[in-house]
Image (cartoon, grey):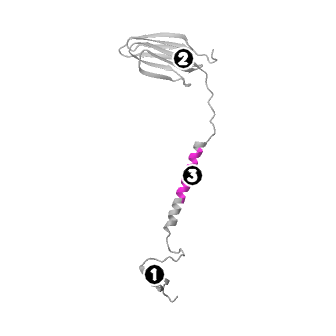
Amino acid sequence: MNGVPSDARNGAPSDTENGAPSDTGSGVGSKDSSGAGRAVVLVAAVLLLACAGLVGYGLLDTEEEPEKPSTPTAAVTYEVTGDGTAEISFLGRNEDGTATVVRDAELPWKRTVRVPLGMAPTVAIVLGEKGGQASCTLAVRGKHVQRATAMGAFGRATCAGALPADGN
């Protein structure tokens, strides 16, 4: 009260005497680093919660997507007999009509697949450079439909049938 800092009256040096700035509590002209750190943590927490909310919405979205109407199918068995290898292409369960190709298939080979009604089940074989002999057979719903034979170098054979769209 007589111009001497309160700490100096007690015999202890004041903060201003040690060279350290004094905190007057007004906050004017002083930097509060813990406040800036808290702001960064707060912004990070808000962003984290926003991301978690978006992920949660995506995982917990219970809205069911409408199912595609199922296309009726029939069981088709493709079989290739012979020795060695052949390239085999066949129609399987895809509605766009593209064939599945098996390269260097070891013979004998057999596959049963579902083919959409209205599509033409087909199996084609191509022999390699060494040639030989191989036969393909096609059965629809267990009934034999067609048989064909390939012979010689790069020999070819195709077996095809019909699946009426009405399922008969």
Q: Is residue 52 rendered magenta in the image?
A: yes
Residue at the spot 35% in from the left edge and 14% down from the top edge: 130
Q: Is residue 141 rendered magenta in the image?
A: no
- Quadrant of the image occupied by residue 120: top right
Q: Is residue 120 visible?
A: no
Few, some or many residues within 10 Å of mark 3 (<14, 14–19, 20+): few
In what element is the residue under mark 2? strand
- Residue indicated by mark 2: 76
Q: Which quadrant, please, contains the C terminus?
A: top right
Few, some or many residues within 10 Å of mark 1 (<14, 14–19, 20+): some
For residue 97, side relative to residue 14 (left or right): right
User: Cα distance, mark 3 to mark 2?
Assistant: 52 Å
In what element is the residue under mark 3? helix
Q: Disc 3 or 2, which lies upstream in sequence?
A: 3
Which amino acid, by three-letter code, is at mark 2? Val
Which amino acid, by three-letter code, is at mark 1? Ser
Q: Residue furthest bottom?
A: 2
Of badges 1 and 2, the one in the foreground is: 1
Which amino acid, by three-letter code, is at mark 3? Ala
Q: Disc 3 or 1, which lies upstream in sequence?
A: 1
Q: Are marks 1 and 2 in contact (CB under 8 Å)?
A: no
- Residue indicated by mark 3: 50
Q: Position of residue 4 (x, y in %)?
A: 48, 87
In what element is the residue under mark 1? loop
Q: Position of residue 66 (x, y in %)?
A: 63, 34
Few, some or many residues within 10 Å of mark 2 (<14, 14–19, 20+): many
- Residue indicated by mark 1: 14
User: Cα distance, mark 3 to mark 1?
Assistant: 48 Å
User: Cα distance, mark 1 to mark 2?
Assistant: 98 Å
Q: Are marks 3 and 2 in contact (CB under 8 Å)?
A: no
